Amino acid sequence: MALPATDTFTVASDTYLGDYANWDSWGVTPVLIGATDICRGDTGDYAGGNWVTDSFNANQYSQAKLNVLTAYAGPAVRCAGGGTATYYYFMTGQSGWDNELGKAIAGTETVLHAGLNDGVLNSVYRLEVNGTTLHVMKDGVAFGSDCPDHTDSSISSGYAGMSFWGSGELDNWGGGNLGGVAYTLTATLGTFAESGKAVVLKADRKMAAVLGTYTETGVAVGLRRGYTVAAVKGAFAEVGLATGLRCARRLPAAVGTFAEVGLATGLRCARRLPAAVGTFAEVGLATGLRCARKLPAAVGTFAEVGLATGLRCARKLPAAVGTFAEVGLATGLLCARKLPAAVGTFAFTGNAADLIYTPVGIHHYTITAVVGAFVFSGQVTALRAARQMTAATGAIAESGKAVNLICVRRLTTVVGAFIFTGNAATLTYTPVGAAYTLTAVTGAFSEVGIAAALRAARQLPAVAGTFAEAGQTVNLVCVRRLTAVLGTYSLSGKDVNLVKTGAYILSAGTGAYNWAGLDATLRTARRMTAAAGTFTLTGLPAVLFRGRTLTAALGTYAETGLPVGLRAARRLPVESCAYSLIMWPADLSKYPPDYIPPQDERTLNLLRRGRVFMPDVGGREMVLTKQARTYHVD
Amino acid sequence: MAQRFYLIPIETIGTTRLPKYLRHGRLRPDGIAALPWSMKDFGNEDVGLVCAEITDEQHTSLSSNIDVVSIPANLDNSVSAIALNVVRDALEGLHIPGNWVTTSHTYRQVTRTVALFFDFMQRVQGLTTERLFSGRALSATWGSLPAGVKQVLRDAATAGGLDYSFVTSSTTIREILLNFAGQWGSKTILIGGVEL
């Protein structure tokens, strides 16, 4: 027979236990009573028997129902067998005799514990021995202070059995081995629920079930260190308050639905919830996957919904196909998260959706997608420090307020449209030796809104396309370059400036160039070169200052407004215009005698001593090719 | 009521051994009603370490017996200089090694070490019904022991996972018990629900 062993003592007639199948006995042998199917001790002495058909482990138990409250009876463990009265026992029964834990060594009994309480009719008493510890239970509950755990080293092995003193009676005996070191709650099919309060599985327990429903109910439901809940198929639920899987728990499932519902549910510290196929949901308040959790899934839907959901610190949520959403308030991917996806849609929606923190030297923040649409929307959506958002094809949009790409962001796309819309859309900060780059092979690029700015050492190169900076305070500051082979370029609005001497170049092969508005200014050492076209400087005061050149091969050049002025050593050579020179008398000797501007041009009264208004075919040379006017000296 | 520890002689009634003086509903119903009580015996020797829930009156009654050794209620107190020799003599008088005790030891350490001595002797008890200290003292050397007793001690040590390679013919029983107790170190000892 296989353990655990059981016996209901069903006999046709009275039979000595020693003559009964599967049993051996000692002392004045107990008798099985045919009329009532129980086992009874005999006379006023110790007696007992043990199951001999199976070998028991050293760690074993014996249990039986107390059938009468006369004399003593109870379970025995580590019985020597062969009629030798060596065993541990627990006996109870008769009122006033108290319960008793003891041992018998070759027929000499030693009382190890004497308690206060009498036996309780029909209760099941169980004696366990584990190592050197004796443990007594009544009706499945530890006996407690009236027979607390006790250690004894005298007997190391034996059989499970029964013991009697006098005519005590037992029924429904059972004996078996205690569980191994690793306690497992294993189920092939079924539903497993931990609900309520105070249900606890402690170290080294085993709860095994092939089929059925398992419920732990009470307060403080917990699985603690080294416990495993394993299920091949089924549904697993932790419901209620403060449910949790803590420290190194594993809940693996091949197929099924997994839900953590309620308040303060959590998977903490090195938990793993792997699933091949299924739906995974964390719902409620303060749900979270923290610190080194892994929720891998080949196919499925992954959702974190509610408040304060988060994936923090080294989480990985890889998925081949699926939809990934973080929705609600304060969602965040913190510290070295990776959300790679081959195909799908990725949305971060709500307030304070952030990708935060960059580990030193590594671009850990990656949102990679081959095909799809990527949306960051809402408020304070930000990509900070060393984030990378790479997309092969698709549309990339950041919209809302305070949309920022800060510190070494890169937005690289092969084909697509890129839009930064709203307030304060900026590319900020240039690291040493690096650049903030918005690169596109084909497409349309726009920065729209207020205070859109490209600052220090940014590059916005484009092979073909349309580039627009519109609104207020559109600036190119300090060593900016806006290079385009073909297309239309416009800087419009107020305070359109090219500032600071250096390689500030706005060059164009063909096209139309407009500086419109107020205070359009070219300052020291700027150059605006155009092969053909129309050039207009409009407004107040349109000025070319010392050493500036506005050179044009063909076209129409106009300075309009008041006061339009050319000052010392400025040149405005224009091939197709009338040539005029107005100067002061002291300077006439410097110029050809017939080089006099017409009278109507004198009325402009704009040029002063030493200034020349000099059209020129050659463009960059101060050469007069025609003398059609007269000198006028004031 | 307080939980207290004692070293009490073991008395045999019929074939049953139990601590002297204390009540037992079936065997000694008129004993001192210090219930519940638990006992850890010194193997086959007639002394047990007893833990009992006891009233002051019952304690007075029990400890008034000259063959009962009462251990102070507060186990975490150190053995005082005045009590040191009393403790040593009390233990040695029961064939329990005691000269290792110093004033740096607490009564809990002393009680736990005594329980470890008892634990080894229980392993001996599982192998033989003979008393080790019948006509023999703690100072008896290994070389003086009969071969059968040596073998029982070796077997008990092996069963307990103890290394007895240190034993020479001049090693005393006292030294063997002390060494074995030291080897067990953190072994769990439960008596009356109290872990020593």
Image (cartoon, helix red, strand yellow):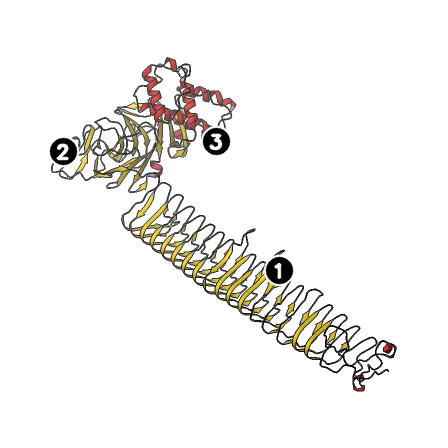
Residue A520: x, y in percent? 69, 74
The chain letter under disc 2 is: A
Q: Give the mark, 2 or 1, whose residue is nearer the N terminus.
A: 2
Q: Which residue is mark 1?
A: A429
In three-dimensional space, the C-alpha distance between marks 1 and 3, rounded to whole angstroms, equals 67 Å
Q: Amino acid at mark 3?
A: Asp
Q: CA distance from mark 2 to mark 1?
A: 97 Å
Pick the quarter of the image with the N terminus of chain B.
top left
- Residue A385 in the image, given as x and y percentages of width and height: 57, 57
Residue found at the very far front of the displayed protein:
A625
Q: Quadrant of residue A16?
A: top left
Q: Residue at x 31, y 44 (%)?
A: A207
Query: Residue A449: where, in percent of width, then height?
Result: 59, 71
Circle number at residue B76 = 3
* Mark 2 lies on residue: A15
Which residue is most to the bottom? A600
Q: Is residue A526 above or below residue A94?
A: below
Q: CA distance from mark 3 to mark 2?
A: 56 Å
Q: Is residue A423 left or right of residue B183?
A: right
Assign a secondary structure to mark 3: loop
Q: Amino acid at mark 1?
A: Tyr
Q: Residues within 10 Å of mark 2 (few under 14, many from 20)?
A: some
User: Mark 3 and mark 2, same subunit?
Assistant: no
Q: Alpha-carbon neighbours of circle 3 within 10 Å: few (<14), some, or many (≥20)?
A: few
* Circle 1: element type: loop
Residue B45 seen from this side:
no
Q: Is residue A254 above or below residue A445?
A: above
Name the disc covering residue A105, or none. Answer: none
